[in-house]
Image (tube, rainbow, N blue to C red):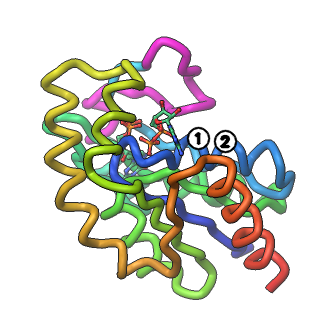
Amino acid sequence: MDGKLVIFSAPSGAGKTTIVHHLLSKIPSLEFSISATTREPRGDEVAGKDYYFISKEEFLHRIAKKQFVEFEEVYSGTFYGTLREEIERIWTNGKVVIFDIDVEGGLHLKRKYGAQALAIFVQPPSLEVLKQRLSGRGTDSPQKLQERFDKAEKELNYAPRFDIILKNDDLKVACRQAEELVSNFLTR
Ligand SMILES: Nc1nc2c(ncn2[C@@H]2O[C@H](COP(=O)(O)OP(=O)(O)O)[C@@H](O)[C@H]2O)c(=O)[nH]1
Ligand SMILES: Nc1ncnc2c1ncn2[C@@H]1O[C@H](COP(=O)(O)OP(=O)(O)O)[C@@H](O)[C@H]1O
C-alpha cells in the first residue's frame, strides 16, 4: 500500500531534527523514517529509534542487495540511507512517513515519489547563524564541524528545488508554520 511522505531537508545545523521532533509530538499520524548509518551514536541517541547503527560491511551488503531507496556517503567515509522496508513498514501501519534527511537525499526522494511527497527545505537566517548553532550543539569535533560548514554552503543553493522553503529564525514560529504546512498536506 502506498502512502504519503513528508521530507525535511537542510544543511546540518539548520534545525530540521528539532522541527521534525516537534511535529512528531504534535501530529500522531506521522512516523519517523529511521535511517541506517555507519556513524557512531551520539550521547543521547538510541539505536533503532534515531538511527539503525550498522557496520560499513553490513551497509555495503545491503546496497548490493538493493535494499535502499536512496543512500549516500554524506560525510567522508560515513554512509546514510533509507531502507525500502522502513517506508513499507510505516505505510503498513497506516502512517505517513516523515524524513530528516540531507539535501541530496531529500531531492532524490521527491523525484521518486512526486506528488505523494511534500519536500520542505529548512532555511537558517544566514550561514553565520548556522555555524553558531552547529558549534553550539556541541556534538562535533572541529574537523567534523568544518566538513558540515563546507557542505552547508553548497546545500543552501538547492533551496529553490524544494516544494517549500521554511525559514527557521524564531523556532516557535517555524514549528507553528511547519505544523500548518504538514496538516494541510495531510488533508489534501
Ligand atoms: N541521504 C541521506 N541522508 C541522511 C539520511 N539520514 C540522515 N541523513 C543526513 O545525514 C546528515 C548527517 O546526519 P547526522 O550525522 O545525524 O547529523 P547532523 O546533520 O549534523 O544533525 C544530515 O544532513 C542528515 O539529514 C538518509 O537516510 N539518507
Ligand atoms: N530557531 C532556532 N534558534 C536557535 N537555535 C536553534 C533553532 N533551531 C534549532 N536550534 C538549535 O540549533 C542546533 C541544530 O539544530 P538541529 O535540529 O540539530 O539541526 P539539524 O538537524 O538540521 O542538523 C541545535 O542545538 C538546536 O537546538
Does 29 sit above or below residue 77?
Answer: below
Given the image, on which type of amino acid does mark 2 rest?
Answer: His
Against 85, residue 55 (above or below) is above
- What residue appears at the point 22 percent right and 46 percent down from the top-left corner? 73
- Using the image, tell me which numbered label, if any, was put on residue 51: none
Separation (CA) of disc 1 from disc 2: 5 Å
Numbered disc 2: secondary structure: helix
Q: Which residue is mark 2?
A: 21
- Nearer-the-camera pick, 60 or 11: 11
Q: Is residue 32 magenta?
A: no
Task: Tell me how many marks there are.
Answer: 2
**Residue 145 appears at what percent x and percent y?**
21, 30
Residue 50, given in percent of the width and then of the height, sits at 56, 32
Q: Position of residue 102 (x, y in %)?
A: 37, 54
Q: Which residues are magenta?
A: 42-60
Badge 2 local density, few (<14 within 10 Å), some, or many (20+)?
few
- Identify the image quadrant of the C terminus: bottom right
Ligand 2 within 8 Å, label 2 CB:
yes
Question: Residue drawn 39% across and 35% down?
Answer: 133
Q: Would you say 14 lies left or right of 115 here? A: left
Residue 18's disc number: 1
Establish if 143 lies above or below 6. above
- Is the residue marked by circle 1 packed among few (<14), some (14-19), or many (20+) residues within 10 Å? few
Mark 1 and mark 2 residues within 8 Å of each other at the beta carbon? yes
